[in-house]
Structure formats: C-alpha cells, structure tokens
Image (cartoon, rainbow, N blue to C red):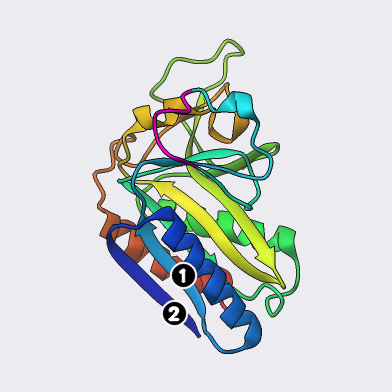
Amino acid sequence: MVEWITSDGLVDYDQAVDFMEQRAAGISAGTADECVWLLEHPPLYTAGTSARPQDLTDPDRFPVYPTKRGGQYTYHGPGQRVVYVMLDVGKRGRDVRRFVQQLETWVIAALAEFNVTGHIRDGRVGVWVVRDDKPLTASGSNPEDKIAAIGIRLRKWISFHGISINVEPELDHFTGIVPCGITEHGVTSLVDLGHPVTMNDVDVALRRSFDEVFGE
C-alpha cells in the first residue's frame, strides 16, 4: 500500500524533511504506509553529501539547505515537480543500484507520455535530453540538457528524498549553482522543450507509470 500525497502551494523545505523523517521511521516500524509525496518548494538550493563549496556560485541568492541525501548542489523552486519517495527498499530487494535505476526508469516513462525521450548517462546522475534544436558541440555531437535530478537517502532500508522534474521552473535560477557539479551541460524543462504541460499532467503520468516500474 503506497499513499500518494499532493500538496498545493509551496512547501517549506525543513517541514518537508521533518515529514520524511517521521514517515520513514513509521514505515520502518511498520506503523505507516509507504508514501509518494508530490510538491513544490519556494526557490532554494540544497547541498548533498558530495557538494563542493565552489559549486555554490551565488550563495546569497536563495536559502541554502545542507541535506544528507546523496549528490551535490540542486535547485528547487516553483514550476518544478519534486517527488519524495518513502519506500521500503528492504522489501523491494535490498538493491540500492536497482532502486536508483527504477527511479530513472520511472522518470523516463513519465516523460515519454509527452513524447520526450529521456536518457541515462554514465558519470552523470539524473535524466538527460538530447537537444536537436541547438548548435552542435565542438566534438560534433548534439548538446544534452538535464531535465530531472535524482538524490536519495536510505535509513534502515527506507528511502527518502527522491527526484525532481523540471516542468516550468525559472531556468535562470539554476545559474546560482553548478547543478550536480556538471559544468559542460545545461538545464531544460518540459515547457522549454516546447511541451506546454501542466503540473497535473506530470502527476497523472507519474501515477500511471509508477506501478509499471515498482509493481510487485
């Protein structure tokens, strides 16, 4: 049984972390159901456990929250669908690599509903799209932009934190950091790619593809 929660408005980051901590403890104790939480945050930066200080290029722009999830600096803000996944990975095979691959597959399946092809690249966490509408790179290949970020934490085999999909965020807000420590690629969104989808459209796609990826 997975409970789905969708929050209207902008959710404070500290409140979100508190909720995840409590829910993860409840799942571990057997007193709470697994949970997928769909929300948006006000503009902020989060620093994962591998974040490098030099990658925070505009430290006074938005609040910065240290976080114990994996990864480096990430931006969250309005127009970005944040998906926090509080799932029992212990009951789902105790395979962290496979779980991350499932998250990636889930994002790619949801994007495919809008005729957007997402890709996974070795050495680059997250989901990427090939930009056929931009000039070729110096090596003669099409540039690639990031459309979704992934960063999780496990405690007693319960996951929290999760993924973020750029629906229609202010892309300039990403310029205050080096997103995920990667300088040679850009950031995009569904609307930036020419797909005028709504947050609800993305939520429906995520719900529809979840069981295909995470079903027992």
Residue that protrudes farthest toward the bottom in the picture? 31
Which element is circle 1 on? strand
What residue type is disc 1 on?
Val
Asked whether the beta carbons under mark 2 and mark 1 sit within 8 Å of each other, the answer is yes
Which element is circle 2 on? strand
Q: Is residue 81 magenta?
A: no
Q: Quadrant of the C terminus?
A: bottom right
Task: List the residue tagged with mark 1.
Answer: 36
Q: Residue at x 47, y 44 (%)?
A: 117
Snapshot quadrant of residue 123: top right
Residue that protrudes farthest toward the top in the picture? 138
- Residue 110 lies, in percent from the top left, at 43, 57
Can residue 216 be seen here? The reply is: no
Task: List the residue tagged with mark 2.
Answer: 3
Q: Is residue 61 magenta?
A: yes
The answer to which of 33 and 54 lies nearer the viewer is: 54
Snapshot quadrant of residue 171: top left
Residue that protrudes farthest toward the right in the picture? 94
- CA separation, marks 2 and 1? 6 Å
Magenta stretch in the rendered image:
58-64
- Residue 25 lies, in percent from the top left, at 60, 77
The answer to which of 126 and 212 lies nearer the viewer is: 126
Q: Residue at x 61, y 61 (%)?
A: 102
Q: Residue at x 52, y 45 (%)?
A: 149
What residue type is disc 2 on?
Glu
Q: Residue at x 46, y 24 (%)?
A: 58
Q: Main secondary structure of the magenta part?
A: loop
Q: Is residue 20 above or below residue 183?
A: below
The answer to which of 177 and 192 lies nearer the viewer is: 177
Can residue 54 be seen here? The reply is: yes
